[in-house]
Structures are given as C-alpha cells and as structure tokens.
Image (cartoon, grey):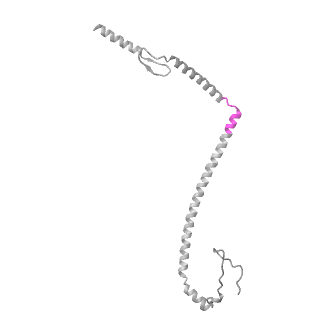
C-alpha cells in the first residue's frame, strides 16, 4: 500500500504540473503532450505589436491635424447642420400645412352641407304652378306655336351655341 499511496501522490503532483496555461489564447491544456502553440502565439504577438504601433501612429496623427483639415471639418459640420435644420423646418412646415388643409376640408364640407340644406329649403318654398300662373295671367306669357318651333340637325351632340337670332 505504501507504493500505491506514493504513486498516487506522484500522479497528483504530475497532474498539477501538467496543467499549463498558454499566454496568447488564455486556454488551459492538460497533459504532458501539449501542442506547439509558441509559433502561432509569437506571430500573433508580432501582429498585435504592429497594430499597436500603427494605432499609436494614427493617434499621434489625429492629435496633430492641420489647420486646413480642421477648417474643412468645421465647414462640413456647419453645412450639414444647416441642411439638417432646414430639413426639420421643412418637415414642420409640411406638418402645419397638412393641419391647415385638414381644417379647410372640414370647413368646406360643413359649408357644402349648409349650402345643400339651404338650396333644398329654397326649392321647397318655390311653387312652380304658382310661377306658371303668374307668368301666363299677369305677364302674358304664351306657349310656343308649331310655326315658332325650328328643328335642325347638329353634327356635334354635346351642345349647341346660338350665335344670332333665328329669323323666319
């Protein structure tokens, strides 16, 4: 049993030592036959260094912008602000115009209904028989005789315009 307990302790010790952490990818590898990641991590570290130096250079360039570039960006900002403010004002104008149009349409509809009601009321007050009686008796109106009626043919069927009096 003594050798077994020593063997177990040795295995536990070896297992603890066999767990390795790779630097670049933060992965744990168990066992003593780890893959060779050193070549890949070295290449990745060089790329990170290249990126970090290029990023550092870009940051330095950003801090040292020329006056012309700053002026160009300022003018571009002012122009875009002007255009956006104009667009917003135009949208507000369109919205208020739509509201006015809707109000005018409601007013038009109300006036049309009122006009139709007034027209119906006036038509109901007119007695055509009374108008005919007054025209014949008081004003001397007579129906047209057969000799006064003139018939003619027209090529156009929509309407006729009388340009002068018809004499017989």
Residue under the point 56% across and 87% down: 130
Q: Is residue 126 above or below residue 113?
A: below
Specify the farthest residue to the top.
2
Magenta segment: 63-74
Q: How many marks?
A: 0
Q: Is 16 displayed left or right of 115 in the figure? A: left
Residue under the point 55% across and 73% down: 116
Name the quarter where the C terminus is drawn.
bottom right
Q: Is 32 displayed left or right of 62 in the figure? A: left
Residue under the point 55% across and 86% down: 129
Q: Is residue 96 above or below residue 130?
A: above
Residue 34 coordinates in the image, percent (x, y): 45, 16
Residue 30 coordinates in the image, percent (x, y): 41, 18
Q: Please tell me which residue lies in front, 126 or 103.
A: 126
Residue 42 coordinates in the image, percent (x, y): 54, 18
Magenta stretch containing residue 94, yes or no?
A: no
Residue under the point 54% across and 70% down: 113
Q: Please tell me which residue lies in front, 83 or 126.
A: 126
Q: Please tell me which residue lies in front, 113 or 93.
A: 113
Q: Is residue 68 above or below residue 38?
A: below
Residue 69 coordinates in the image, percent (x, y): 69, 34
Q: Is 6 displayed left or right of 75 in the figure? A: left
Q: Which quadrant of the view contains residue 82?
A: top right
Specify the farthest residue to the left.
1
Name the magenta segment's main secondary structure: helix
Q: Please tell me which residue lies in front, 87 or 11.
A: 11
Magenta stretch containing residue 67, yes or no?
A: yes
Q: Which quadrant of the view contains residue 3?
A: top left
Q: Which quadrant of the view contains residue 133?
A: bottom right
């Amino acid at each position: 049993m003594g050798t077994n307990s020593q063997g177990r302790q040795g295995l536990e010790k070896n297992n603890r030592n066999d767990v390795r952490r790779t630097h670049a990818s933060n992965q744990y590898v168990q066992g003593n036959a780890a893959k060779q990641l050193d070549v890949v991590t070295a290449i990745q570290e060089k790329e990170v260094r290249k990126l970090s130096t290029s990023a550092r250079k870009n940051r330095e360039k950003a801090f040292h912008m020329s006056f012309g570039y700053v002026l160009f960006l300022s003018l571009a900002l002012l122009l875009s602000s002007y255009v956006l403010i104009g667009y917003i004002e135009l949208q507000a104008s369109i919205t208020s115009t739509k509201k006015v149009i809707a109000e005018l349409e409601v007013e038009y509809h109300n006036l049309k209904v009122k006009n139709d009601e007034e027209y119906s009321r006036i038509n109901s007050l007119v007695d055509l028989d009374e108008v005919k009686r007054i025209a014949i008796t008081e004003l001397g109106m007579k129906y047209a005789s057969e000799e006064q009626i003139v018939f003619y043919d027209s090529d156009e069927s929509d309407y006729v315009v009388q340009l002068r009096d018809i004499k017989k």
